[in-house]
Image: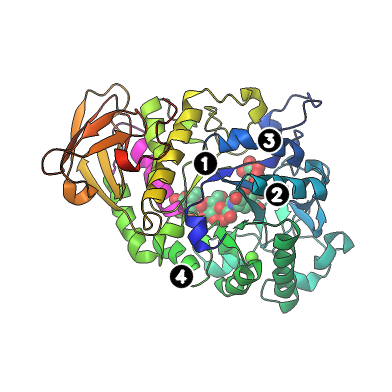
Amino acid sequence: LDDTSARSASVYQIITDRFARPSSVSSTCNASDRKYCGGTYASITEKLDYIAGMGFDTIWISPIVENIGGTTGLGEAYHGYWTLDPDGFNSNFGTADELKALSSALHAKGMHLMIDVVINHVAATSGSTFQPDSAYGPFSQSSDYHPFCWIQDYNNQTNVEDCWLGDDQVALPDLNTESSTVSDYWNNWVKTLVSNYTLDAVRIDTVKHVPKTFWPNFVNSAGVFTQGEVLNGDPVYVGPYQNDAKVNPFNYPAYYPLVRGFNQTSGDLSELVTMTQTIKSDFNDPTLLGSFLNNHDNPRFESTVTDTSLIKNAHAYPFVTDGIPYGYYGSEAGFTGGADPDNREPLWTSNYDTSSDMYKFFASLNAARKAAGNASDSFYSSQMNVTSPSSSSILIAKQPLISILSNSGSSASDATVNVQASASGWSANTQVIDAISCETLTTDGSGNLAVTVKTGLPRVLIANSQKGQVCSGS
Ligand code: ABC
Ligand code: CA
């Protein structure tokens, strides 16, 4: 994917070990045990229709390289982030040929593959006494690492870049990414990775722990779209990773106000509205940020919120705003796991139910986004306008998609939100469909539309003439 094609992608995030496994495996999988549960590439391949059925066209899978084996004080390396040898392959998820078969199967369906890569560190069960050896493949020399020290001050960027993540149970020895031995290795490695598995995109771990100057060459060597994790809520801090380092960050700055705005009926939505404006000034291109509600590092939204209307509004946000939407596996199944490791439940317990309300909800959101992109060449690349018609609602105008999200909750009484023709672009007496309820509304003689928000549900609106596959199943 290049930037233009990446903007129209919709990504489904998978923890490879937890998404699907062969039916011959029957052991119990408790996320809290932090153990391998048997998920494989071959089993993902069999479930692509399940993913495509929700309208996602890209999957992000866990890191694929050889990890430290055995068990640690923090369990096994089932998530794939504990690199031993980046030239080795983690055989727990299947073979390299099975991964290539997954890549081919995706491409045959017009879908795309994104793989997670860890550049900042490797892993070890020793901290201050760590000594690399040949097991670490290309990184077997002490000079390949920054000297031992734990990261202790996240406000000190030198400390964040040069010291080590992890703890006494699992240390993450920090690679000397300023050394040309290390950076040359990684640049070649990512180029080979993309070519071997015909990757369409790369997700980059721990971006803020590597100096910004490292990234432009790396991104260039990858040659495909990159989305990077800069885990910080401050847009002033995160912006330069897009503007200067050339990695497109996940939208953590929007994530925190999104959660706070929708996790209770008294949530403050103005914080989110203001953030969307700040993001426009701090990032060169907000339409390339990765938008998400859930992921593998944070408690699922549903771990603290049970109101189905609040849950739907919060989940709708990434799909109706600027940026590339990411759905986290299990959201469609109503999973409620809290902090890591509880948010990494096995999906097979859901029986991959395609008739659930949330499964259909994600399908509706993706259909609306796709219809808008098909109807307008500038939908993905032009920036939205977010306003707040009332203290419990926001109006997101991203023509031709107009959405009203509310945090009034499922027991709220009906409330009316006026959508002005100047915001929507709709002309007089235009029929408009709500992708969520499939209700049809009609603008007045001036093109304005009074929309009734019912039981606090989101409204995701597009002109009938542009609806494409929206509500085609009902
Ligand atoms: C394991 C256990 C956990 C246990 C942990 C100590 O050890 O499973 O239960 O709590 C992988 C595995 C994890 C594993 C870790 C460590 O390795 O997935 O299960 O945790 O062994 C990335 C990945 C993540 C991955 C790694 C390591 C890195 O997405 O899945 O973890 O390869 C920092 C990093 C970030 C990293 C994250 C886990 O740690 O920056 O890249 N994620 C502050 C700091 C952040 C920090 C964050 C969490 O705390 O600024 O840098 O992330 O510790 C906002 C502020 C933020 C603030 C947040 C909390 O609040 O703006 O700055 O973040 O308002
Ligand atoms: Ca580092």
The disc placed on residue 243 is: 4
**Disc 4 residue: CB within 8 Å of ligand 1:** no
Report the Cα–Cα distance between label 3 and label 1: 15 Å
Quadrant observed for ligand 2 in the rendered image: bottom right
Crowding at dot 2, Cα within 10 Å, few <14 / some 14-19 / many 20+, comes out as many
Mark 2 or 3: in front is 2
Assess whether mark 1 and mark 2 are in contact (beta carbons under 8 angstroms): no
Q: Residue furthest right?
A: 134
Report the Cα–Cα distance between label 2 and label 1: 19 Å
Q: Quadrant of residue 33?
A: top right
Mark 4 or 1: in front is 1
Crowding at dot 3, Cα within 10 Å, few <14 / some 14-19 / many 20+, comes out as many
Mark 2 or 1: in front is 2
Point 76% across, 39% down: residue: 42
Instruction: Return the disc, 2 or 3, that comes first in the chain's sequence.
Output: 3
In the depicted structure, whether residue 347 falls above or below residue 366:
above
Q: Foreground: 187 or 107?
A: 107
Give the amino acid type for the residue marked by disc 1 in the picture.
Gly
Assess whether mark 4 and mark 2 are in contact (beta carbons under 8 angstroms): no
Q: Which residue is mark 2?
A: 103
The image position of residue 220, as x and y in percent, is 61, 71
Assess whether mark 3 and mark 4 are in contact (beta carbons under 8 angstroms): no
The image position of residue 27, as x and y in percent, is 78, 25
Give the amino acid type for the residue marked by disc 4 in the picture.
Asn
In the depicted structure, whether residue 11 falls above or below residue 449:
below
Give the amino acid type for the residue marked by disc 2 in the picture.
Ser
Mark 3 or 1: in front is 1
Q: Which residue is mark 3?
A: 18
The disc placed on residue 327 is: 1
**Span shown in magenta:** 251-269
Instruction: Return the disc, 2 or 1, that comes first in the chain's sequence.
Output: 2
